[in-house]
Image (spheres, rainbow, N blue to C red):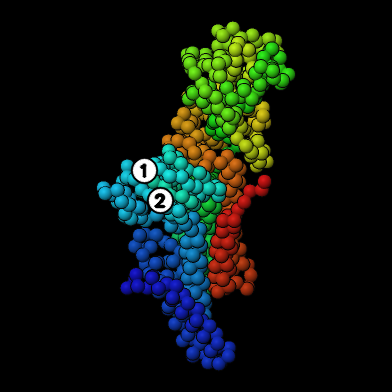
Amino acid sequence: MQQFVLKRKNHLMVSGGALIALGFFSAFVLKNETAAIAALASASVLGALPIAIQAYQSIRLKIVSIDVLVTIAVSGAFALRNFEESAIVTFLFLFGAYLEQRTLTKTRSAIKELTEMAPESALKQMDDGLFVEVPIEEVEVGDVLQVKTGARFPVDGSVASGEGHVDEASITGESLPVGKTAGSSVYAGTILVDGTLRIVAERVGEDTTFGRIIELVEEAQDSKSEAERFVDRFSKYYTPAVLLLSVLVWAFTRDVELSITILVLGCPGALVIGVPVSNVAGIGNGARSGILLKGSEVIHDFSRVDAIVFDKTGTLTTGKTRVAEARYYDGAGDSSGGVSAAVSEDFVRSALASVEAESDHPLAKAIVDHLGDVPRLTVEQTSVVKGLGITATVDGRRVAVGNARLMDAEGVLLDEAARADLDSFSRNGNSLVLAAIDGRLLALMGIRDTVRPGVREDLHRLKKLGIRNLVVLSGDTQETVDLVAGELGLTEAHGRMLPEDKSDYIAGLKEKGLIVAFVGDGVNDSPSLAIAHIGIAMGGGTDVAIETSDVVLMNSDFGRLPHALGLARATARNMKQNIAIAVGVVVLLISSLIFSEWMNMSVGMFVHEASILVVILNGMRLLRYKTSQ
């Protein structure tokens, strides 16, 4: 019976509203007082039924809930034959609960949208080689699956064959499709825009990146912040206190209606709903923006952060080596940029690309990428000189590519201009690769990790948000770290640091009383991510970094960091605003009841429910939050 009534709470609310309208119509239009009393009394009973059941259930758990206060108040009004007030109070109370449930459902839409993206079936290759559609639960690690144009990838895996473009917005937030070929990684929940791919399943079900994202968001939305725990403790004592106040007022005044009105006005409905709405809406905004905030406690700490420490490689920089500076010589050792008649710059570029293509060294790959689609020449007699470089014969000429020691070994002349270039490239933080043909230095390449595009602007936005301490920690040389810090305008830079040095540095900042966030992406960053107040992982990083962190920036998009900080602060402010609105309304109502003549139970309940609507609307503003550029 109880479940039957509670499941139809909204129907009872609508019926009560209709009966209230009928009651007022009978009273003011038909002038039929009997019909009006019957309609309003019926509305009171219908509306009070689910409230009384919820009050009974809370009493069984030894909790004096809001439902208990409203049930006592409505019963008292009914006993005093104030049917108008009892009917309006129950209707408004049920309407407030309806708005609350509807709002929570809407703010959890981010989770719903995520779960709806998860495929329920897959085309699995069977023993006879044919692909058959099977439920996703029958897919195991190692299975070969086929994905056609327009379909979602059912698992995390690697491409075995085929080519195509994939919309990875559900994972990374990026709208531009990404090209995939054999060996590329793909993620569950993403969409194949064109082509047909065969993939090998590597992670299935909840172990996929998509599954872990859903789990993290669910855990975050269900966790409680310090503010919510405060509200829980406050409500635990506040509600009995209101009940006691009502009894004392009755004891001293013998005014039953006044004591009942205090019960209604003292209901902390807006206080109970205000903080969860802010929390869920803020996390929902983050999920849509490619930011995973792991709980309201994280939001609380992140909103107060005053120092952000960065790992360099893969965080402030791309983590991929590129040719940053290049110089070609005429063979006499000057740096005029000219070419000799015997060896043209085009030949130098082709010979260099052809020789470096023989190597799988990261610096060689950076040079091949830098030179691009130049004609390739036949390379013969290739010889790798350990620790120095590589030598080979190209078109009958001897080519040497390596460091300065290889040039010495080859008897290559380095005049003053070339040595000046070597010093300049080194000071700029480059690794050096020299190329000589027939004993003449013809090219110098400076290779280094490059700063992520837009990072300088993003750091400026963090400064505008009030972050004064921006620090970079790295295992690279102090000179290299200083260059990056100078280019980006960071306040401090520390090089040659091991993982334990980084975590010790962060511990030192905490001892100084600073609230510290650390941003990193690798396994070596995990200790720092764990010890910082807020660990922020780049989403393209390692699994352990993502699991250890409190905030994840999907697709390693550094540009989302200012939005994440702004959103955390906006959410924390929103929680405080809702608490202030809720407490302020209760104080206003009680004061008005004591010091004015216009306050009564119906007006008080109306203001109460209006305050619930206000905090709900205030919290939902966070769903549209955007940071200024």
Residue for point 63% across, 27% down: 324
- 571 w.r.t. 29: above or below: above
Q: Closer to the camera, 73 or 400?
A: 400
- 507 w.r.t. 626: above or below: above
- Provide residue 340's location: percent of width, then percent of height: 69, 17
SS class, disc 2: strand
What residue type is disc 1 on? Val
- Provide residue 515's location: percent of width, then percent of height: 56, 36
Q: Which residue is mark 2?
A: 147
Q: Distance from label 1 to label 2 (Cα)? A: 11 Å
Q: Which residue is mark 1?
A: 200
- Provide residue 365's location: percent of width, then percent of height: 53, 27
Q: Is residue 397 something one can see in this rendering?
A: yes
SS class, disc 1: strand
What residue type is disc 2 on? Val
- 198 w.r.t. 525: above or below: below
Q: Is residue 403 something one can see in this rendering?
A: no
